[in-house]
Image: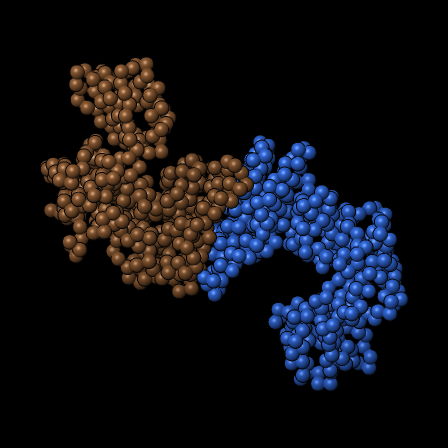
Chain colours: A brown, B blue
């Protein structure tokens, strides 16, 4: 939320939902840029602020927003009561700045709900076993909301933000992208490049684990948003839910290494030790006892990874050469439906071939097929696939 | 505290006190105008903010300052740990906005002190029996500090502010006013017109009750300040500690009421019912079965009081008349020493007579003599009395 007006708008929304006969509990994050301002303040005081004290500092942000919302609710005759993480209490482990919720004592919140009150809980925060304040990390308020919905056995957990749902792909790339009515937990995790702007990955995992239906909606409009649950869109619905993509990839290929056990380990061990995350990995079929080994890393890690790999193979594979590129991108076709439908990969490759887009790497999972392409083909690829799988909105087709 | 620089200065001060071999616990209030800003925010959201939620909102202020001080302390290698009122916990009653401390659990703070840590506690806040956040009201941080000093049996409770101690009178009226080295709890309460800018009355009462020596000092300089304790300045020290004054008085006199039991009650009952505080009260000796009855109220209450008194006596005392004045001021000579010294009053009246200052009312307590004078004589009276009781600083005399 950004201002007093947003607090009042949120209060109106709560009042309306309540007037529809629902029992409502609200989880709030800090207002506007509060968290950024507090982080900046901390860094003006200390080069490396104590993680324990940073949590004390940052959790003051939600304290302000929950109090203000309760005041705004009382102003329109909705009885409400605010709770800090330490008051609920929301128990977490002791990892400051990235704590995980361990258990919630929902008795008091349940009593409030039974009494017709609206509990307003501070998101993002909890308390460890020694009564120290903890924070769940950025976006942790989503996780708090899902965890409370699970603890209270809520019918639905609504996440309000500045987007009105999950789309079949990024509307900035494909203007005909369509809002999904429903999507499954598995799909939303694979659609992370679309969903990450909307919903914290951990919140989704939590929701999946405890089977809490989550609805992603716009804070400032009325639409139904996108419901995330275990049920897929329709029984005989579309096979593919969306086209995800990622521009942050870089590709490294080691050409002509010996085809022997342990070669992947030799190459990737130092990369893993440097805590560099590897995404796609491809090992070609051997030719003349030699293979090409390719993988992708985040673009920011490209230079460091090149160095590490060069050092790793210098002695053991003097004949191999290393090539790579930063100008690659990953496009993924995602859908629970593809589990039972053959031919998705075929249709994908056909579509890309028609557009003369060369596929450099392929990775598959049960509900996703990803290809690595030259970055300049990203938009064309996304739009073509979006069309090939009939994802575009009917009204605009 | 007003800024990052003040946080860092406070950290340096803690480090220095610690380096001198003391074990230090810090109580902090909110930074600068935080509390005012939050109150304003609340009033933008609600015409009459819920007291419970106002406490949640306001107590976020100290949360920020304690976290920042701990970070600043860590930065200069002083291990510190912050505590909210709810974490200590500091138990209070449930009167939001003006809660009173009921008991403190000092075990964790004591363990920190034993381990060489500096506990940094949020002032002004506590928690009631149902785990609701409470605030002690403006200046409550002083009370928190004194209460913690009492609970931990501290050698001394230092209150740092923008003044460097308690003075014999207001230096703006008498430039030769002298900082007192020591003053007793009783005296500081009587010197409230001097001390109120420095220290909350409740904090002083708490300190007196639990016999916690309190030192009032400047935050930004090195002086020893003024020590407030049960011991008076010196065994054979000055009789008078200071000259207090108050410009907020207004005088009302009912002339010629019948001298009968209950007349004071008849006049003051409606004033008390209107929650108007009465300060000085004087009933003259009767003359021809009639007396003059005078009292003072706060200047802001003058008009309302006049109306109330007029209504009260209209029927029962039709012959009495009412006179009054807003242009009066109270001057008080304060000192524990005067208990055992006769002649203080005589010297006071002699001094005022020498300056031709007419005394309109007199009130006495064990350690204070107050006179009501015309306001225009206030400065002259204060300076003359300051001189008559040899309070001026030696260097400037």
Which of B315/B328 is in front?
B328
**Residue at x 16%, y 18% (from the top left corner):** A287
Image position, residue B271 (x, y; %): 65, 72
Question: Relative to A273, does residue A260 appear above or below in the rendering?
Answer: above
Q: Quadrant of residue B200?
A: bottom right
Residue A125: quarter of image: top left
Where residue A240 appears, as percent x and y from the top left, is 16, 43
The answer, for residue A130, to whether it is visible in the render is: yes
Location of the N terminus of chain A (image quadrant): bottom left
Indicate the position of residue B226 as horizontal and vertical percent values. Answer: 74, 47
Picture residue at 82% right of the left edge, 82% below the top = B288
Q: Is residue A117 above or below residue A314?
A: below
Relative height, residue B70 to residue B134 (above, below): above
Q: Is residue A215 visible?
A: no
Residue B34 position, x and y percent, is 54, 53
Residue A379 in the figure: left or right of residue A39 = left
Which is more toward the observer, B6 or A316?
A316
> In the rendered picture of this protein, how many numbered marks are placed on residues?
0
Above or below, B135 relative to B316 = above
Which quadrant, please, contains the C terminus of chain A?
Answer: bottom left
* Residue ID at (54%, 41%): A45
């Amino acid at each position: 939320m950004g201002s007093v007006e947003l607090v009042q708008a949120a209060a109106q929304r709560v009042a309306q939902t309540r007037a529809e006969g629902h029992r409502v509990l609200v989880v709030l994050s800090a207002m506007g840029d509060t968290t950024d301002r507090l982080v900046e303040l901390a860094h003006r005081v200390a080069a490396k602020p104590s993680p324990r004290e940073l949590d004390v500092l940052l959790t003051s942000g939600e304290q302000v927003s929950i109090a203000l919302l309760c005041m705004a609710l009382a102003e329109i005759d909705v009885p409400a009561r605010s709770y800090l993480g330490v008051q609920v209490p929301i128990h977490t482990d002791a990892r400051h700045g990235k704590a995980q919720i361990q258990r919630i004592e929902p008795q008091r919140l349940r009593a409030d709900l039974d009494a017709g009150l609206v509990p307003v809980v501070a998101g993002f925060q909890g308390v460890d076993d020694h009564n120290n304040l903890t924070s769940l990390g950025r976006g942790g308020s989503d996780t708090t909301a899902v965890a409370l919905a699970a603890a209270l056995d809520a019918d639905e957990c609504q996440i309000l933000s500045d987007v009105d749902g999950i789309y079949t792909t990024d509307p900035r790339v494909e203007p005909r992208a369509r809002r999904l009515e429903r999507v499954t937990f598995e799909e939303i995790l694979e659609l992370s490049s679309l969903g990450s702007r909307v919903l914290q990955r951990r919140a989704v995992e939590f929701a999946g684990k405890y089977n809490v239906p989550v609805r992603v909606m716009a804070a400032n409009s009325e639409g139904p948003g996108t419901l995330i649950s275990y049920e897929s869109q329709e029984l005989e619905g579309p096979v593919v839910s969306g086209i995800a993509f990622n521009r942050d990839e870089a590709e490294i290929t080691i050409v002509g290494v010996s085809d022997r056990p342990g070669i992947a380990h030799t190459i990737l061990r130092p990369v893993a030790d440097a805590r560099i995350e590897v995404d796609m990995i491809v090992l070609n079929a051997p030719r003349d006892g030699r293979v090409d080994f390719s993988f992708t890393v985040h673009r920011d890690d490209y230079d460091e990874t090149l160095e590490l790999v060069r050092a790793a193979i210098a002695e053991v594979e003097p004949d191999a050469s290393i090539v790579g590129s930063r100008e690659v991108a990953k496009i993924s076709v995602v859908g629970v439906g593809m589990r039972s439908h053959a031919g998705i990969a075929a249709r994908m490759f056909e579509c890309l071939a028609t557009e003369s887009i060369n596929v450099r790497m392929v990775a598959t999972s049960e509900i996703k097929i990803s290809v690595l392409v030259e970055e300049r083909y990203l938009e064309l690829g996304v739009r073509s696939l979006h069309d090939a799988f009939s994802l575009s909105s009917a009204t605009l087709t």
